[in-house]
């Protein structure tokens, strides 16, 4: 990714504007609706058979990653909503559940109408696939974090740890960075316009999700200095997983394309985002 394409950070724009609090993020969601069934995939279906093999495989893998994440997230977010300590947070998390469900509908259409696959769950197949680091990050870690949550209570720590893992690490450091590369690369090639449009819209959703996670973690840390260290420790624990997943994404990039330093982009984004909410997080070398 070139610096010019990442200079304007939509997450920072949200935090500095209408999305500076939970209710504002909800209103942004109301204003940014889109229809999974309205995206035209006809040109994608006609272009796909003529694509180079490496490009077809990369697109299929990236779509599968997104489908796996959305599958896992729809289950985890139900637990997040049940555990969130106040109504404002619960309302926004409900919008995110709707976003992930919409992603599943779009990705099922792409898999069926563009790739010729059956619209079936991908979790089991990915458990046996070569995408070990990505599967570990998108599925196993999030499933375990959600399963550990109880109901609402006086200690928001377990939910804050799950929010960091999902909103910041999975959606932000992995999803936003990997999806931006997909959009940029397909725009350069002027290919698969439906997939590009759907990915761009999903990115807009993801920016809201990251902003929510940052606000939640900043609120959590602000109430007690010990919680700042706790958030840093959670991130230190999760970092090897996102590092390995991003390296796998770089290795999966199509031939004759340069994904750039995805991990470096993720680190830089994390630095920008945490500074915007005055959240002190570890610096990863």
Image (cartoon, rainbow, N blue to C red):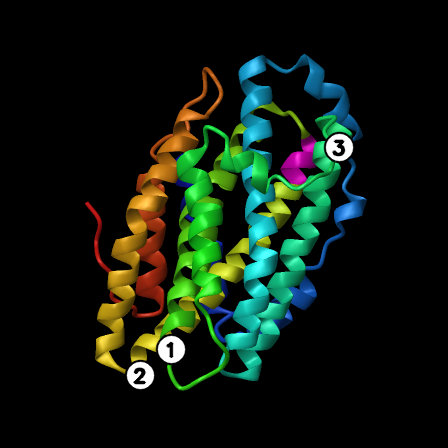
- Pick the front one: 243 or 187: 243
- Asked if the residues shown at circle 1 and circle 2 are in contact, with their CB atoms under 8 angstroms apart, the answer is yes
Cα–Cα span, label 3 and label 1: 42 Å
Residue at 47 percent across and 47 percent down: it is 138
**Magenta stretch in the rendered image:** 193-197
Residue at 61 percent across and 50 percent down: it is 71
Can residue 98 be seen here? The reply is yes
Q: Which residue is mark 3?
A: 112
- Pick the front one: 247 or 134: 134
Can residue 183 be seen here? The reply is no
Q: Going by the image, does 129 lie left or right of 63?
A: left
Say which element carries label 3. Answer: helix
Earlier-in-chain disc, 2 versus 3:
3
Q: Which residue is mark 2?
A: 223
Residue 195 drawn in magenta: yes
Number of marks drawn = 3
The x and y percentages for residue 93 are: 57, 69
Say which element carries label 1. Answer: helix
The x and y percentages for residue 139 are: 49, 48
Q: Which residue is mark 1?
A: 219
Can you tell which quarter of the image residue 39 is in? top right
How would you classify the magenta stretch by its main secondary structure?
A: helix
Earlier-in-chain disc, 3 versus 1:
3
* Quarter placement of the N terminus: top left
Residue at 39 percent across and 62 percent down: it is 164
Looking at the image, the residue that sits furthest to the bottom is: 154
The x and y percentages for residue 8 are: 44, 50
Determine which of the numbered discs, if any, sits on residue 256 in the image. none
* Quarter placement of the C terminus: top left
Say which element carries label 2. Answer: loop
Q: Going by the image, does 205 lie left or right of 17?
A: right
């Amino acid at each position: 990714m070139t610096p010019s394409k990442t200079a304007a950070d939509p997450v920072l724009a949200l935090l500095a504007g209408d999305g500076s609090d939970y209710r504002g993020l909800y209103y942004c969601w109301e204003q940014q609706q889109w229809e999974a069934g309205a995206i035209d995939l006809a040109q994608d279906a006609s272009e796909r058979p003529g694509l180079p093999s490496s490009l077809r495989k990369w697109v299929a893998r990236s779509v599968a990653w997104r489908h796996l994440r959305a599958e896992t997230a729809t289950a985890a977010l139900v637990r997040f909503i049940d555990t969130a300590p106040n109504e404002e947070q619960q309302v926004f998390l409900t919008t995110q559940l709707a976003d992930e469900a919409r992603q599943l509908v779009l990705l099922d259409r792409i898999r069926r109408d563009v790739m010729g696959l059956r619209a079936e769950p991908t979790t089991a197949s990915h458990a046996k696939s070569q995408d070990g680091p990505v599967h570990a990050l998108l599925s196993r870690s999030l499933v375990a974090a959600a399963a550990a949550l109880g109901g609402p209570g006086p200690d928001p720590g377990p939910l804050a740890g799950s929010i960091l893992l999902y909103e910041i690490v999975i959606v932000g450091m992995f999803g936003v960075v990997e999806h931006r590369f997909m959009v940029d690369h397909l725009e350069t090639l002027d290919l698969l316009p439906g997939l590009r449009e759907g990915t761009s819209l999903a990115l807009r959703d993801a920016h809201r999700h990251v902003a929510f996670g940052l606000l939640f973690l900043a609120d959590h840390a602000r109430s007690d200095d010990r919680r700042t260290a706790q958030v840093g420790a959670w991130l230190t624990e999760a970092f090897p997983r996102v590092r390995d997943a991003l390296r796998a994404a770089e290795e999966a990039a199509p031939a004759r394309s340069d994904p750039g330093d995805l991990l470096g982009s993720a680190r830089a984004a994390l630095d920008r985002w945490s500074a915007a909410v005055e959240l002190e997080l570890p610096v990863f070398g």
